[in-house]
Amino acid sequence: MKTSDRRTFLKTSGLMLAGAALRSDAATAGAAEDAPKPWKKAFMLGGVGEGPILPRFELLKEAGFEGVELPSPNKLDRDEVLRARDKTGLVIHGVSGSQHWKDTLSDPDPQVVERGLAAIRQALEDSKAYGGTTVLVVPAVVTKNVSYRDAYTRSQANIRKLIPDAERNGIKLAIEEVWNKFLLSPTEFVRYIDEFDSPWVGAYFDVGNVVEYGFPAEWIRELGKRILKIHIKEYAKANRFNYPLGEGEIDWPAVRQALVDVGYEGWITAEVPRKGLSEMREVVRRMDQILKMS
């Protein structure tokens, strides 16, 4: 083989091998992104009342859920909750504040705020006792009597009072964006969280809550590592949240890709009506389908 021909052959072969390697790497990366993710499925068990908790835990476990989120403060017997947790193996990954709509941290009445702070402190203790890692907090509610500015400043001032309690219990305060006329853009949510400058305050992102005025995937990318937990429910403008997962307006592939892109690895909790075993199994199936969770 002539020297020039040999050089051409080697160059061409090298390019072909490099191209094959790039295609292989791209295929591997694509397969990795499409592969089921190790997100864990949980259910938001609201409205628990005073009845026995074990049958409800058993139903969720049999349906295929790995974890549960409880409201707090609640009227449940803590020892009974712990026995149900241990018997079923269902993880109580955190709690959701049950009084933050009533006793808001943005209220102008100091007595209302003190009740709100006491409720969140109780929730921190409950979450620790259950083996959880977070307390979901609705930080403020904007009303005709509470301006946006006041809601912002008051809620931040009061959440700062809770940070020492969070640190002492080893439980993070997870701020949720919800239909409270507050934190209406992802950039503002980011700023609100960052201004605490604390590892004990992060975001609890609810996918369905922003579809009315934004795109969940954009919010996820903006919030990034600030996201501590995820709530999911479906949404469509005609009937709001009253749709099965996957049958509304949410672009679930885009949501999934955004979660992959920001490296989210935590719990994904369904906040949907609680029904019988067959319906709960269907919720699990739909979670697997829309987010490729298993």
Image (cartoon, rainbow, N blue to C red):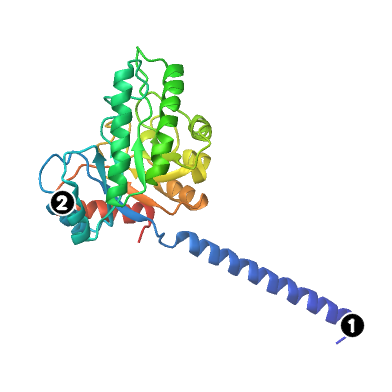
Q: Residues within 10 Å of mark 2 (few under 14, many from 20)?
A: few
* Position of 42 relative to 143 (above/below): below
- Which kind of residue does numbered mark 1 sit on? Thr
187 lies left or right of 71: right
What label sits on residue 72 in the rendered view? Answer: none
Residue 243 place in picture, x, y as percent: 26, 40
> Residue at the location (46% across, 17% down)?
149
Tell which circle, 2 or 1, labels the residue nearer the N-terminal end: 1
Question: In the rendered structure, are the residues bearing label 2 and label 1 in contact, judged by CB atoms less than 8 Å apart?
Answer: no
Q: Secondary structure at mark 2?
A: helix
Q: Nearer the viewer, residue 36 or 250?
A: 36
Image location of residue 103, percent across then percent down: 28, 24
* Outermost bottom residue: 1
- What residue is shown at x 43% (from left), y 50% (from top)? 256
Regarding mark 1 in the picture, which secondary structure is present there?
A: helix
Look at mark 2 in the image and give the residue it sits on: 80
What residue is pinned by disc 1?
Answer: 3
Q: Viewed as shown, does residue 61 lie left or right of 252?
A: left
Q: For residue 177, which quarter of the picture?
A: top left
Q: Nearer the viewer, mark 2 or mark 1?
A: 2
Please provide percent x and percent y for residue 272: 25, 42
Q: Amino acid at mark 2?
A: Glu
- How far is mark 2 from mark 1, CA to CA? 83 Å
In the image as oriented, which residue stretches furthest toward the top?
145
Q: Above or below — where is 94 with respect to 121? A: below
